[in-house]
């Protein structure tokens, strides 16, 4: 089976507040997304990429191969789940419904190759899965005034990262179902949970950050060098 990776890159980066989408901001001298795609294309287990772009993307360089691997594109939608669904549709026909597919945020350039391998190997033994990390901080529930109302148990609470890996057919069906319900989901695993699956949580390095704010850009620049 050939393992492809869908890369949602159709967001607008509203929390970053820059004048272009955050995936195109410079990071260590190149657009942020170039680092992400380079790491994925260089990975020996990944056969090809589908990059999901915004409808009016003026920044995409129009590449069709990277490190000798095919790079396809699709046009995303209003929600991340719409974008991932569009990416799944753009996979080549050689990717069967029963084949696993990775989904990785364009905004996570510091992902480690060793974590990708561990996810692939462990999640393939389950209904798929995702990289994440157990919560380390004490977790508070706030009231509307921003005061701490209660302390939530930290046990069994995880932060969810990407890549996430699911079977093409099952993930497509799960995302279509939430789209029909108009139910917002924050990641692929949530759509799978709602469809009755139990995605495996695979612990990964916490430096696989999602670049969200300007401070994250500086941190990612630092982390890129040490996570290569
Ligand atoms: N994404 C996407 N399609 C959307 C929304 C998000 O492809 N409709 C992608 C983003 O480009 C990003 C990833 O999903 O690579 C994670 O989303 P997020 O970090 O929330 O990025 P943005 O939505 O761009 O940022 P913000 O929420 O601050 O606007
Ligand atoms: Mg967003």
Image: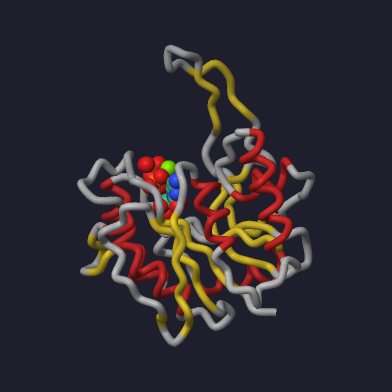
Residue under the point 47% across and 57% down: 8
| Residue 51 visible in the current orientation | yes
> From the image, which quarter does the C terminus lie in?
bottom left
- Tell me: residue 119, above or below residue 20: below
Q: Nearer the viewer, residue 118 or 8?
A: 8
- Tell me: residue 157, above or below residue 220: above
> From the image, which quarter does the N terminus lie in?
bottom right
Residue under the point 41% across and 70% down: 37
- Left/right of residue 215 with respect to residue 113 in the rendered view: left
Q: What is the basis of the colouring in this image?
A: secondary structure
- Left/right of residue 122 with respect to residue 27 in the rendered view: right
Q: Quadrant of residue 222?
A: bottom left
Q: Position of residue 190 (x, y in %)?
A: 65, 44
- Left/right of residue 202 with respect to residue 38 in the rendered view: right
Q: Position of residue 149 (x, y in %)?
A: 54, 16
Q: Quadrant of residue 51?
A: bottom left
Q: Nearer the viewer, residue 152 or 183?
A: 183
Residue under the point 65% across and 31% down: 153
Q: Nearer the viewer, residue 211 or 66?
A: 66
Q: How many marks?
A: 0
In the displayed image of the protein, which residue is found farthest to the bottom?
68
- Tell me: residue 107, above or below residue 37: above
| Residue 209 visible in the current orientation | no
Ligand 2 is in which quadrant of the figure? top left
Q: Position of residue 133 (x, y in %)?
A: 58, 52
Q: Position of residue 74 (x, y in %)?
A: 46, 61
- Left/right of residue 132 with respect to residue 106 in the rendered view: right
């Amino acid at each position: 089976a050939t393992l492809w990776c869908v890369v949602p890159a159709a967001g607008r980066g509203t929390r970053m507040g820059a004048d272009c989408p955050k995936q195109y901001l410079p990071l260590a001298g190149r657009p942020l997304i170039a680092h992400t795609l380079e790491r994925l294309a260089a990975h020996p287990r990944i056969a090809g990429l589908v990059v999901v772009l915004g409808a009016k993307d003026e920044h995409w360089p129009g590449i069709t191969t990277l490190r000798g691997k095919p790079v396809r594109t699709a046009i995303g939608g209003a929600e991340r789940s719409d974008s991932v669904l569009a990416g799944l549709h753009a996979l080549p026909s050689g990717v069967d419904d029963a084949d696993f597919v990775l989904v990785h945020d364009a905004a996570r350039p510091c992902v480690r190759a060793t974590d990708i391998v561990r996810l692939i190997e462990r999640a393939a033994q389950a209904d798929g899965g995702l990289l994440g990390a157990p919560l380390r901080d004490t977790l508070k529930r706030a009231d509307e005034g921003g005061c701490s109302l209660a302390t939530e148990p930290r046990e069994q609470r995880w932060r969810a990262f990407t890549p996430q890996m699911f079977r093409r057919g099952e993930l497509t069906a799960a995302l279509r179902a939430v789209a029909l319900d108009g139910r917002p989901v924050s990641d692929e695993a949530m759509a799978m949970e709602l469809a009755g699956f139990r995605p495996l949580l695979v612990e990964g390095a916490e430096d696989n950050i999602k670049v969200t704010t300007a401070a994250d850009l500086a941190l990612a620049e630092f982390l890129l060098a040490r996570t290569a």
